Amino acid sequence: MPAAAAPTNIRVAVTGGAGFIGTHTVELLVALQAKVLVIDDHSHPCGEPLPREVEVISADCASVAAAKALAAFKPDVVLHLASKGGVQKAARDPGDHVKMSLASTVGLFDAAIKAGAARIVTASSGGTIYGEGAHLPAREIYKPAPLSAYGAAKRSEEVYMAALGLRHGISTLAMRYGNVYGPRQDGTGEAGVVAITCYRLLARAAPRVYGDGGQTRDFVFVRDVAAANLAAVLGRATGELNIGTGRETSVNTIVKRLLAESGRHSATDFLPAREFEVRRVCLNPTRANRLLKWKAKVSPTTGLRETWAWFRTRHSAQRAATLGLP
């Protein structure tokens, strides 16, 4: 269904809606006059206030409180964007990651079905599910071969969701994101080289790269991802879809461009490569182009410039507040 024909009374529950990708997506939904419920435990809020029309429940997405909120809200669609931990956190304790992330996600799927949702869309990982050695750009028909606990968990979420969808006769779609970057991303964690590099440059620290920096990723701008989420919520596509640009960009290239934006002249700190990380990532977005009428529009140059400008403005505002300036 094209965005222009979107029903204004659609009811959408968004887990992780207070986060980086979530806030961008919720804003688009509200602009279409959708009724939105956000379920978020606020463990990773981006700091951007949600539109006042949005109902917000502060809870884990698999909690009793979340299930009750879903039952009362009666969503048409549930969009699952909540995530707990990345590749490195999952690698350190796979068992805990299964409890905290996979079990929570499956519980959310069950609660969504019991609340009467006719469709579930979930955020998955094109960067980890295909593994190493796939012919690039990777296509959805390729056999999943995750190297990491994180990728294995994401693939498990896809399988659980598809099985529950078949069992209960509801529509399901897994969105296999590339490396999402842009304004509002957390630059203080372990994942997100763009945000981390911006944060370090503003702190007058050297950029940090794990490995030789020649590893590539499919960097996709958050506003494009939010548009894909909107199309997925309103559409009927099922199965799995890659959400990426179809272009490889090296980590070294990203760091070099951010250094240019910042005007800094700094050597990069190269640290030992991380285990279980895929060397090359590039996603074929043809199926999303066809089924969602979606295509990434923001170029890396524009996206990185906008991201750096956001981090710089936020840093300036925080520094002014610290110094007590108006």
Image: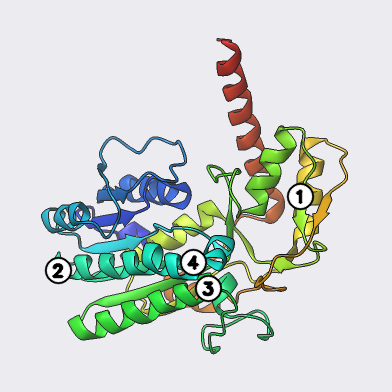
Please state which amino acid type lies under the numbered disc 4. Answer: Trp
Q: Label for residue 294?
A: 4
**Nearer-N-terminus badge (3/1):** 3
Q: Position of residue 85 (x, y in %)?
A: 49, 58
C-alpha distance separating marks 4 and 3: 30 Å
Q: Are marks 1 and 2 in contact (CB under 8 Å)?
A: no
Tag in front: 1 or 2: 1
- Name the residue type under label 2: Lys
Q: Which residue is mark 3?
A: 149
> Which numbered tag is attached to residue 51?
none
- The residue type indicated by label 1 comes to Arg
Sequence-wise first label, 2 or 3: 2
In-image side of 155 versus 200 (left or right) = left
**Vertical placement of 230 versus 201: above or below?**
below
Q: How is the image coloured?
A: rainbow
Task: Give the residue at x 67% y 56%.
Answer: 299
* Structural crowding at the residue carrying mark 1, measured as other residues with C-alpha within 10 Å and reported as few (<14), some (14–19) or many (≥20): some
Kindly check if marks 2 and 3 are in contact, taking CB atoms under 8 A apart as contact: no
- Residue 259: horizontal and vertical position, in percent? 80, 43
Q: CA distance from mark 4 to mark 1?
A: 33 Å
Residue 241 visible: yes
- Residue corresponding to mark 1: 208
Quarter of the rendering occupied by the N terminus: bottom left
**Residue 258: percent from the left, percent from the top?**
75, 45
User: Which sits earlier in the primary sequence, circle 4 or circle 2?
Assistant: 2
Under mark 3, the amino acid is: Ala
